Amino acid sequence: MDPAVLREDLVDGLESPSKGVLTDEAVAIAMRDVPRHEFLEDDHSAYADREHEVLETRVLAPSTVGRLFEALALEEGDDVLIVGAGVGYTAAVAAEIVGEQRVHAVDISRPLVAEARTNLERAGYEGVLVDRRDGADGLPEYAPFDRILLEAAAVDPPRPLMDQLADDGRLVLPRGTQPQRIAAVDADGSSEVFEAVSFDPLLLEGEQSGAVERNRTNREDLEYARQRAESRTGWEQEWIEWDDRLR
């Protein structure tokens, strides 16, 4: 079946009263226009309302993408930061609403950054900037942002991301551990809570796919052990020649 027809059916379903996901016309139009099949291998399943897994990361179901954008409340001309670029689909939806040159995306995984760049270019959104960064640090070189979308769970919004919001900016994230809920946090600290969701937690450097050590506890234990070893003096160091030190 023609992908355009599948897109129409998908968005019609998200707008239906039974699902009630999409009410923002700009988001609905964007999701009708973005060729989601360019971001996933199988054309048909790309338009099923379910998650996929690519390069050890979850590609969000279209209904989840719709809910995030409803909370984000994008307006034409907004400067946008997507934290957790993934395969690039959400960045493309944002680009349809605000324009390619106003969308920036970061991901901690190098393979995903390469994947997102390739997919965005193939889909016609080569103007979107995608960079390899620790998401919690944001992209200060291009701040401030009118809207920031964090596609990973956190108990509280990372401070650097809040600092990179414009004065009337808004940050949307899955907030909490379990259960999580979509939360929109404005630059002044006020917040609004939406639907319950389930996202993977925000990764730190060293935990991304392909890293040498992905377990945070193990990584910190190794670092503490290294610090202790480097700080040892006196009897803990067998190689110290005490006779020489006393002369």
Image (spheres, rainbow, N blue to C red):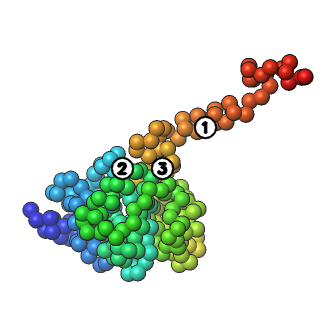
Q: Which residue corresponds to mark 1?
A: 223
Amino acid beneath label 2 = Pro
The residue under the point 44% across, 75% down is 79
Q: Indicate the quadrant containing the N terminus: top left, top right, bottom left or bottom right.
A: bottom left
Amino acid bearing label 1? Glu
The residue depicted at 51 percent of the width and 48 percent of the height is: 205
User: Which of the 4 image quarters holds residue 106?
Assistant: bottom left
* Label ID, residue 203: 3
Across and down, in percent, residue 103 comes to 40, 70
Q: In which quarter of the image is residue 83?
A: bottom left
Compared across the picture, whether 23 is left or right of 223 comes to left
10 Å crowding of disc 3: few (<14), some (14-19), many (20+):
many
Q: Mark 2 points at which residue?
A: 111
**Residue type for callout 3:** Leu
Q: Where is residue 170 in the image (x, y as percent from the top left)?
A: 49, 72
Marks 2/3: CA–CA distance = 15 Å
Identify the secondary structure beneath mark 1. helix
Task: Give the mark toward the camera: 1 or 3.
Answer: 1
Q: Which label number is shown at residue 52? A: none
